[in-house]
Amino acid sequence: MKIQLPRTLALLLLLTIAAPLLSGCWDQVEIEDRALVLGLSIDKIPADDTQKEDRVTHIHDNSLPTEMISVTAQIAVPGRVPLGPGTGGSAGEGKTSPVWVVSVRGISLDDAMNNLQQQIADPRYLVHLRIIIISEEIARGSLAELNDYLRRNPEIRRRTWLLVSEGRASAFMDVNPPLQRVPTLYILSMMEKSVSSGKFPRDYIGTFWSADSRWGQSAYLPYVALRNKDNILIAGLAYFSGGRMAGKTAPIEIGGFMAMQGMDPGGYSTLLRTRELGIVMTKTNERFTRTRSYIKDGKPYLSYEIFLEGDLDEHYSSDIPVNSPQKLHEIERDFEQQIQTVLTGLVKQTQQDHSDIFGMGELIRSHHPAYWRKHIHGKNDWESLYSSVGVDIRLTLHIRRVGLKHD
């Protein structure tokens, strides 16, 4: 004899069993109730600035460090962040601004972020943090504490951009670009498009940490500057040694660095004076590099063969026509000599500063392991040895196009 449960009791039992499976959103937090931090800037506070920290995480203690940093956060205002270009806007426009800019102080970055949380109602989230800008003064000091906080925080994406600024980094949080209402998103778009157009390497914060942890390579970051208040210039590479910024390159040397690394596509134009044809402008479209490493007389030696393909963009001296392959070869020859001098100077500059941004040490480690094990026992050993590495650079340019104009 079968026992049948009443229909109502059976339905109630089914709902009771299914209830634990339907409660996945019991602890949800709506996006409107989160303080989404889009960008951060970090500056050192001048020693003569007497304004004190709010001391949210600690009481007055003379044993704590006296130096403080200023952190400026750009927080998205729910419902006001546009999906495309708008009429322009900045943090100073009050109610119509898509972002809220908040500045706090702290002894460390974590301390400052806790002070920030004390001043905003919603819980802060860093999952949408895409841009971190530090001042050159911060970069020339130790980045150990900054990197420690960022690497421990699971909300920080490894594809976040870390930039070094000329002057105060907080100024970048208040720019008003006409092409984008949100300054952080404009800077992000600028860096991403620079990568795709061949004007800058793909150097996210994860790439920076990876290079910094290798014994045979030094790290580098984008070096940016403000022009006319709202114009952002990629002013070079900020390269590091011993965990601190050691120097910076010129903008045109970014192209030289990418050429030595064989990074495609090419994107830099070069203005030069030739011996026979006057001033010309060439544009590089493709790069290819062949690298070899040797051990000579007990010291590492590397050779770079760089092959470039490009166009003749402009010829200033119209009275001297470029109308034959021989004259194109003259432009190629003068370009090769002048740019080879630029590359040699860049290598010597980084050798003087003990910053191997080219990763030459990694080539020696992989191709000459016995030499590496004998002489290198830490990153400092290679950074010291890098200054004596022999480097030979050979450059070849092939101009494929001269445009539609015939001289």
Image (tube, rainbow, N blue to C red):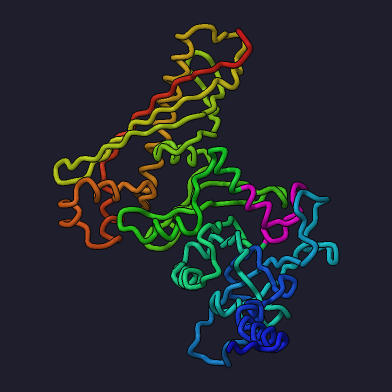
On screen, residue 309 versus residue 49, left or right, reads left
Quadrant of residue 157 within the rendered picture: bottom right
Q: Residue at x 57, y 61 (%)?
A: 135
Quarter of the image that includes the C terminus: top right
On screen, residue 152 versus residue 168, left or right, reads left
Front position in the image: 57 or 83: 83
Query: Is residue 155 in view from this perspective?
Result: yes
Query: Is residue 52 in view from this perspective?
Result: no
Quadrant of residue 196 within the rendered picture: top right
Rendered view: 205 above or below 272: below
Residue 259: % across, % down: 43, 36
Rendered view: 70 above or below 188: below
Quarter of the image that includes the N terminus: bottom right
In the image, the segment drawn in magenta is 171-190
Front position in the image: 267 or 298: 267
Q: Residue at x 56, y 46 (%)?
A: 235
On screen, residue 207 versus residue 128, left or right, reads left
Front position in the image: 225 or 80: 80
Question: Is residue 189 a member of the stretch shown in magenta?
Answer: yes
Residue 49: % across, % down: 64, 76
Q: Residue at x 60, y 59 (%)?
A: 131
Q: Residue at x 57, y 80 (%)?
A: 111
Question: Is residue 187 a member of the stretch shown in magenta?
Answer: yes
